[in-house]
Image: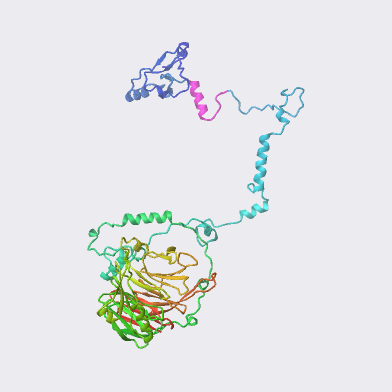
Amino acid sequence: MRLVWSCDLQDIRNTVGNIPMEWYKDFPHIGYDLDGKKILKPIRNKDELDDFLDKMENPDYWRTVQDKQTGSDIVLTDDQVDLIRRLQRGQFGDVNFNQYQPTVEFFSGDVMIHPVTNRPEDKRSFIPSLIEKAKVSKLVHAIKMGWIQPRRSREERAELAGRFYDLWASEDPNAILGRHKMHVPAPKLRLPGHEESYNPPPEYLLNEEERLAWEQQDPEDRKLSFLPRKFSCLRSVPSYSRFIHERFERCLDLYLCPRQRKMRVNVNPEDLIPKLPKPKDLQPFPTTQSLVYRGHSGLIRSISVSPTGQWLLSGSDDGTVRFWEVCSSRCLKTVQVGEAVRSVAWNPNPAVCLVAIAVGCDVLLLCPSLGDRLLIASTEQLLSSYQPPEEKGEELVTWTTAEGEEHSQGVRLKLKHPKAVQQVVWHPKGDYLSSVMPQPSSNLQVLIHQRSVRVYNLIKQEMTKKLQANSKWISSMAVHPAGDNVICGSYDCRLAWFDLDLSTKPYKMLRHHKKAVRGVAYHPGYPLFASASDDGTVIVCHGTVYNDLLQNPLIVPVKVLRGHTLTHDLGVLDVTFHPTQPWLFSCGADATIRLFT
């Protein structure tokens, strides 16, 4: 059955325009005709079986197509099928069209009487174009900047064509191109070792002493950030408690740590070492242990030498104060004080024979009665002339006169303090005495002095400077005889040298000791200073201070003195120099005093 278009069928055309017909999929109509009426979809109740029977029985099934705009089936004519086949083969749709017919030249070389067009020329054909001017200026600028290269000659092109290069040269870090690559990869984590195993070898496990030493160290000073442990099986291993903390620190290292590639500079390693004089050229300084003073039964906390250098004073935890003869190491006098002696100090004035002893909450002023009799008599007369003040007000320190057994041992005056006295020091002229004790009301002042040193003007009674030692806990301090330099020892194994005219921060930080620094001292005459530590050593250094303010002090370690034995993890507790000779006295927890000359 072949459909033939009639006038009635041609009038029924869909007028919805060029739109997707899928929009009418869910509607009963498929569009609108010229009169605006709905074009209903034809009833299509064929299933796949009917379609297959139609394909077998209908001879025109192969040329039947569906019109999407009307929804009806249309049978193509022979001419329409022939047209489709010609278009599929890439030929022209018109059968009568000759694609090889001769061309007719529209323009020819012959002069014609009438022009092709008689239109007058535009005004823009006489005026230079601004757009072309802008394009030309851009090209000129690109040529000047080198962005556009002129055309190379044939010889240059042939030379470039024969040149080869390594495509992966930039990947090699040792190559020239690779060194200019600025990407710096992130540092990789260290691979786990035997100590991180759940069943490590016995030599990787810490004993009780090593575990206590590991716990006392600061986290940044520990070689391992964890304690190696041993488990019977992998199932017994608990979760790692520091996992999140270590991951967080790793992230901080990756994005906060500045990474920069620096070119290596060829420098002779010997040029980086400062040119220091040899210790042989800096003599004299103490080098040899000469005498050992024995007699105390407890650890010796403090020692002091008389201004003449003939006598030595020591205070111990055994509750005694002993006076020694320096040259013979003979104990001349022993004074029982009943408590542990915290500090002793001999008056530096050679015209007075007087010592100060810090015992508990008291400071004892004692006349040792050693040396010249006239000197002893003048000292006794000076101490006996003390009269208590008539007006009694609020005083932190109470002065009393010693009586009875104390007076017979040489104690003349007692200074009663509200708290335990930690240290006692004389003024260099011997006119004033200073004692150190905790603050009665709070510990704030003591906490502040753990990390800093305060310098006061005694005349104006005000603080002038505050020295930051960059240490966790300051243990000892000594002032240079010239008064413009200070050294401080700390419990974190450091010794800081301060130049008061330069800065409030350390000029030099020395880290020669392995354990806490207990005492430091300057020599009153020679350019020497020493430090004592719990590692059982005393380090002597040469320290020259120049009169020229533009020249920095010269600091050179010259000798390490050994001899004290460690007792209860304590080594050398105090150190002091002889007033006139380059000799050094040291006392320690082994209840001995040693003289190095």
Residue visible at 36% across and 84% down?
377
Q: How is the image coloured?
A: rainbow
In this view, 556 is above or below 463: below
> x and y percent of residue 446 in the render?
34, 63
> x and y percent of residue 462 in the render?
43, 63
Of 143 and 494, nearer the camera is 494
In this view, 537 is above or below 469: below
Look at the image and give the residue range highlighted in magenta.
Answer: 77-95
- Asked where in the image residue 588 lies, by quadrant, the reply is bottom left
Q: Is 160 placed left or right of 554 in the picture?
A: right
In this view, 367 is above or below 47: below
Residue 439 seen by the camera: yes
Number of numbered labels in the structure image: 0
Of 374 and 158, nearer the camera is 374
Q: Quadrant of the C terminus?
A: bottom left
- Asked where in the image residue 412 lies, by quadrant, the reply is bottom left
Q: Residue furthest bottom?
A: 328
Q: Is 95 placed left or right of 371 in the picture?
A: right
